Image (spheres, coloured by chain):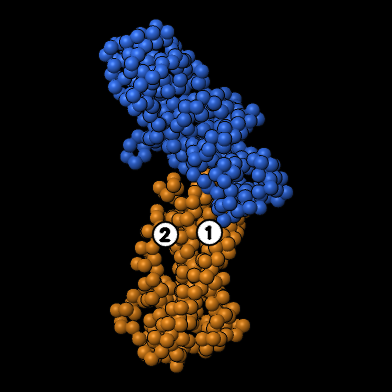
Amino acid sequence: MSAVPAPLELDGLTRAYDGRTALDAVTFAVRAGELFGLLGPNGSGKTTLFRVACTLLAPSGGSARIFGHALPTESAEARRAIGVVFQSSSLDVHLTVRENLLHQGHLYGLRGRELSQRIADGLARAGLAERARERVGALSGGQKRRVELAKGLLHGPRLLLLDEPTNGLDPAARRELWDHLAALRDEGVASLVTTHLMEEAERCDRVAILDAGRLVALGTPHELRTGLGGDVVTAEPAATDRADVLLRAVRERLGVEAQAVGGVVRVRTGDGGPLVARMLAELGDQVASVSVGRPTLEDVFLERTGRSFAA
Amino acid sequence: MTWLPAWTLFRREIVRFLRQRNRVVSALVQPLLFWVLFGAGFSGSLRVGTGAGQGSYEFLFPGMVVLVIVFTAVFATFSLIQDRNEGFLQSVLVAPVSRSGIVLGKVAGGGALALGQGVVFLCLAPVAGVPLSVGTFALSLVVLALIAFALTALGLAGGWLMDSVQGFHAVMMLLVMPLWLLSGAFLPLGGAPPWLRAIMFANPLTYGVAAFRHALYPGGLPGQDLPPMGVSLAASAAFAALFFGAAWFVVGRRTRGDLR
């Protein structure tokens, strides 16, 4: 182990839940000041992992450490070091924005002038300084999320844990939240963010991909994508919603392995150019468009699990 | 890390309550209605066993004060389930707060609300023909506080183990109402058949109600067949301690509810 313990270190983490193995020997570490994405479809175990990391669930096998503090035995120390943003709101809608933050500060042993200063700073940063005296119930979804984030950051944690934080937000609010996380990363605050969205995972420094409780890939988005090599040819069927028909045609007539994902047919190949030419020549009447691109995290998932991500 | 979190949870309980006016109103109006209707309905038939020449309004009055407390204290359970459903509780559970801090804050908050409303109702005593002096008021306050905190602790322990609002309503009907009905608040101990008396004497709330009646009538209530004041007070204190301990124990454990 290095001199400075990692914000989050999982070693063979296993957790049985509802009589099945929700996490199966997962090993990875979130490094200091890193924006780390935990990507997986629903039921992949990422919420279970999130709950272990935020001290709500104890590991049933292996170990989990927060800045070197073993869970669950050193939960108290770990709790001081983490800020948590839950998927569902944890704000009290009957209290004002400021009251919610005051309450949160008290839970972390903060009080008096220091707490007031932190609240003022947090609200200024969230762009909510002038909404401080309003009830949370009166805020928009995006504003609530910003309060939620300010709440999680109030005690100055060095690791932020966020469970699907952009759930239910409009695109502008989503972008804003990710900009905020990137800014925090630049200040040295590490984040672990669970998501089922590829484009969000692309914004992370590193990504762990979970499937059925197992870690199936780990690396920077770039590493993971380029690790696959080659091109991806994407064909959109002429008849909408008939990706299955086109898929069969591609397999049978072109003799290549392909997958139908999200209404289009994708083929991984070394060099996309010749395949595009063949596709247009032989299946021209069945495709609306054909394009060539680099592999995405979607392809990484497909490659490692043999299944499409299909969020 | 116990006192500051406990204080902030306590404060929140009070602030939330005052901002939900319907809660204030319903907790007071329902017992008031019961009192007026039952008082009128039983005015002819309740002489038996009440002793001391009390009319039905006067006899039922202490029970109604206790009912206000029962309703409000049990609402602490509801507030806990709400905290869970609204997601508020999850941020408390991941904070570096001892579980005893959570129990203290919640019981103090819910108990204070219950006591406060009980006292508001108690101020109607002269209307009911119940004599009230500084001394009897002060002693009543102590007894009502014991009842309020005991019931709130019990409600908290129950709520912690409960998942849904439906479960809460079931418990309300199957446990809380009989608890109150069979406490001597509504049916006089004196007139009850032996098997019912046995049940009533096993009911923790019976001792609270008896202590409250003693507190209001320092001259004694011959014929009501109440347990003596000393026994009633001691039993009430013991039950309060027991329920607080139960809440402490239950809240200290991890439950599935932590994950909602």
What amino acid is found at the position of numbered circle 2 in the picture?
Answer: Gly
Furthest residue in direction front, as rendered: A285
Q: Residue at x 42, y 86 (%)?
A: B40
Is residue A224 depicted above or below B121 in this figure?
above
Q: Give residue A24's position: percent from left, percent from top.
A: 38, 30
Tags 1 and 2 on a common chain = yes
Q: Chain for mark 2?
A: B
Q: Chain for mark 1?
A: B
Q: Residue at x 57, y 42 (%)?
A: A142
Q: Which mark is residue A144?
A: none
Furthest residue in direction left, as rendered: A252
- Residue beneath disc 1: B106
Q: Give residue A21's position: percent from left, percent from top.
A: 35, 34
- State which chain is coloured blue: A
What's the CA distance linking mark 1 and mark 2? 13 Å
Circle 2: is it few (<14), some (14-19), or many (20+) Cα within 10 Å?
A: many
Chain B rendered in what hue? orange
Is residue B60 depicted above or below B68 in this figure?
below
- Residue beneath disc 2: B158
